[in-house]
Image (cartoon, rainbow, N blue to C red):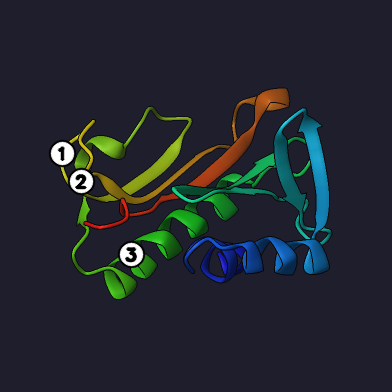
Amino acid sequence: MWLFAQYCIPPYSQDLDATLNQRLNRWTPLPGVVSWVDDRSASVLRTDAQRCSIATNVPFALSRDEAAELRDLVDVFARQQFPELAYDPKSTMGDTELATAWVYGAVATPERWGIYAFAYPDWGDSAGSIMSFSRRKSGR
C-alpha cells in the first residue's frame, strides 16, 4: 500500500521517472515496456500519464491473509483520500479471488477513473495480485 500511495497517486511526470530510477530497479520486460521492481516486496510498478499499477507474482504473491489486508487497506484509503469515489459492488469476484473497486463515472466512459485491487492467492503457480489507479482524464 505504501508503494501505491507514494508512487501511483501523485500526478505522473518525468520527475517521477527520475525518482523511480533512484529508488527502484528499472526493468524492461518487453521492448517499450518500462517497469520498476521494489527489492523489498518484489512488486512490479508500471506507470504512465493515465494509469499506475503494482503487481505481485509467484513466488512473491500475497497470501490470502495479506490479500484480505490489502483489500481492506484499499477500502479505507479510497474512502479517506477520494470521497468522490463510490464502491463498486460488482468488483467482487469468485471464492478464490479478493477484489475491491472504488470508481467514478460509468463503465467505458471518459469520465471513468478510480482504484481497483484484485488478488488471486489460491491460484497456485499463477497466484498474484494487481492494484491500479486510473487517473482522471486531464481537463476534466
Residue at the extreme bottom of the image, as rendered: 80
Nearer the observer, 97 or 30: 30
Looking at the rendered structure, which numbered label has been put on residue 111? 2
Q: Nearer the viewer, mark 3 or mark 2?
A: 2
Q: Secondary structure at mark 3?
A: helix
Label 1 packing within 10 angstroms: few (<14), some (14-19), many (20+): few
Looking at the rendered structure, which numbered label has been put on residue 32? none
Q: Amino acid at mark 1?
A: Ala
Pointer 1 residue: 106
Q: Secondary structure at mark 2?
A: loop
Residues at marks 3 and 2, CA–CA distance in whole angstroms: 17 Å
Q: Secondary structure at mark 1?
A: loop
Q: Is residue 101 left or right of residue 14?
A: left
Whether tag 1 and tag 2 are in contact, CB under 8 A, the answer is yes
Q: Nearer the viewer, mark 1 or mark 2?
A: 2
Residue at the extreme left of the image, as rendered: 106
Q: Amino acid at mark 2?
A: Glu
Tell me which numbered mark, 1 or 2, is placed earlier along the sequence.
1
Identify which residue is drawn at 47% across, 65% down: 11
Residue 107, how many percent across, how many down? 21, 33
